[in-house]
Image (tube, rainbow, N blue to C red):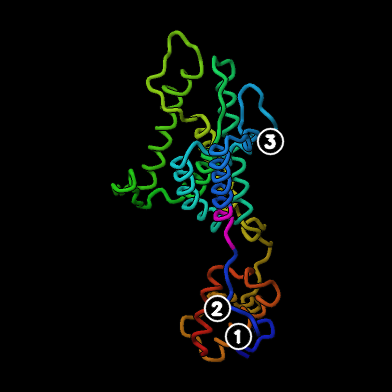
């Protein structure tokens, strides 16, 4: 039985992957940005409820402030990093972890920003999903520190460096901006003044980096934990070699016979029938394509 003979494959168009959580997030951010443009052009007040204000923070504002952005470049920068690193987190850990890290990072950034401004001389506000994006970046790239990446500085100057150095420079700039620009700007200190003014919530970025590091450490520890087989205590008597069953080899053969390829294909098709195409792993999807081409 081939793939076209299956009942659930008849009268169906080509399968299309559902829109990723990363793409949905970017679509929502762009939609809110367009609404904000309409608001500014019409002189209306549609989105002020979403801004997190330092003097009167509302419960929902700890999260909704991430929907708004200062301008086009603020939105573009966040969306580019989100598209890159969010897709990695979604692929490596799943959609649920992606949303958990994004939301927790946004909340963590808002909390650090709020706490570091307590007692300040100015009533400020914060918008942008940068903290959540920074958290996703840490989770996505902390296990790829030796990888080489090429960044386009100012969108035209290519710079190639290791992920380790990119993350280190990002953390350093965030820390220096928080100490020398943001903190003294928000407080009326007599002996410590701002070295520069950039209107960036470095404390929010710092909160996102902290949350991302903690989340990566937790996920890494969970994934590297001992399996059930590793924690079992050895039995007092070793089993007889004659009674041991041969280990099952689940590795697909590179050049299976016609019968083996058909049997393996039938197993994958049965899995699709039971749980849908989305139940296949990325490797199983590739294997399905290989076997289908082999049996044509």
Q: Quadrant of residue 66?
A: top right
- Furthest residue in direction top, as rendered: 190
Above-or-below relation of 124 to 135:
above
Between the C-alphas of marks 2 and 3, the distance is 45 Å
The numbered disc on residue 3 is 1
Above-or-below relation of 59 to 266:
above
Would you call the spot at circle 1 few (<14 residues within 10 Å), some (14-19), or many (20 or more)? some
Quarter of the image that includes the N terminus: bottom right
- Furthest residue in direction front, as rendered: 42
| Secondary structure of residue under mark 1 | helix
Residue 23 position in % (x across, y down): 55, 55
Residue 161 position in % (x across, y down): 32, 47
Earlier sequence position, callout 2 versus callout 3: 3
Would you call the spot at circle 2 few (<14 residues within 10 Å), some (14-19), or many (20 or more)? many
Between the C-alphas of marks 1 and 3, the distance is 49 Å
Residue at 63% from the left image edge and 72% from the top image edge = 277
Residue situated in front as seen by the camera: 195 or 276:
195
Q: Nearer the viewer, mark 1 or mark 3?
A: 3
Residue 214 visible somewhere in the drawing:
no
| Secondary structure of residue under mark 3 | loop
Marks 1 and 2 in Cβ contact (< 8 Å): yes
Earlier sequence position, callout 1 versus callout 2: 1
Whether residue 142 appears in magenta in the rendering, the answer is no
| Secondary structure of residue under mark 2 | helix
Between the C-alphas of marks 1 and 2, the distance is 10 Å
Q: Kindly identify which residue carries mark 2.
A: 288
- In the drawing, does residue 69 fall left or right of residue 240? left
Magenta stretch bounds:
19-24
Q: Kindly identify which residue carries mark 3.
A: 60
Above-or-below relation of 61 to 281:
above
């Amino acid at each position: 039985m081939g793939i076209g003979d299956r009942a659930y494959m008849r009268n169906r168009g080509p399968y299309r992957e559902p829109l990723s959580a990363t793409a949905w997030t970017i679509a929502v951010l762009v939609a809110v940005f367009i609404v904000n443009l309409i608001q500014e052009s019409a002189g209306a007040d549609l989105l002020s409820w979403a801004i997190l204000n330092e003097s009167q923070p509302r419960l929902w504002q700890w999260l909704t402030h991430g929907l708004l952005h200062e301008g086009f470049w603020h939105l573009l920068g966040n969306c580019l990093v989100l598209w890159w690193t969010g897709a990695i987190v979604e692929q490596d850990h799943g959609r649920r972890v992606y949303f958990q890290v994004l939301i927790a990072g946004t909340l963590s950034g808002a909390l650090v920003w709020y706490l570091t401004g307590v007692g300040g001389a100015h009533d400020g506000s914060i918008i942008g999903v940068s903290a959540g994006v920074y958290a996703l970046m840490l989770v996505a790239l902390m296990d790829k520190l030796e990888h080489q990446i090429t960044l386009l500085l100012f969108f035209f100057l290519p710079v190639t460096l290791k992920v380790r150095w990119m993350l280190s420079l990002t953390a350093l700039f965030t820390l220096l901006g928080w100490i020398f620009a943001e903190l003294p700007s928000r407080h009326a200190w007599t002996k410590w003044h701002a070295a520069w003014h950039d209107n960036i919530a470095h404390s929010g970025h710092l909160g996102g980096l902290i949350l991302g590091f903690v989340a990566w450490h937790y996920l890494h520890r969970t994934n590297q934990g001992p399996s059930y087989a590793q924690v079992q205590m050895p039995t007092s008597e070793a089993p007889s070699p004659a009674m041991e069953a041969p280990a099952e080899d689940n590795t697909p053969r590179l050049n299976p016979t016609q019968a083996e390829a058909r049997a393996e294909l039938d197993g994958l098709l049965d899995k699709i029938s039971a749980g849908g195409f989305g139940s296949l792993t990325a490797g199983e999807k590739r294997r399905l394509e290989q076997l289908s081409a082999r049996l044509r």
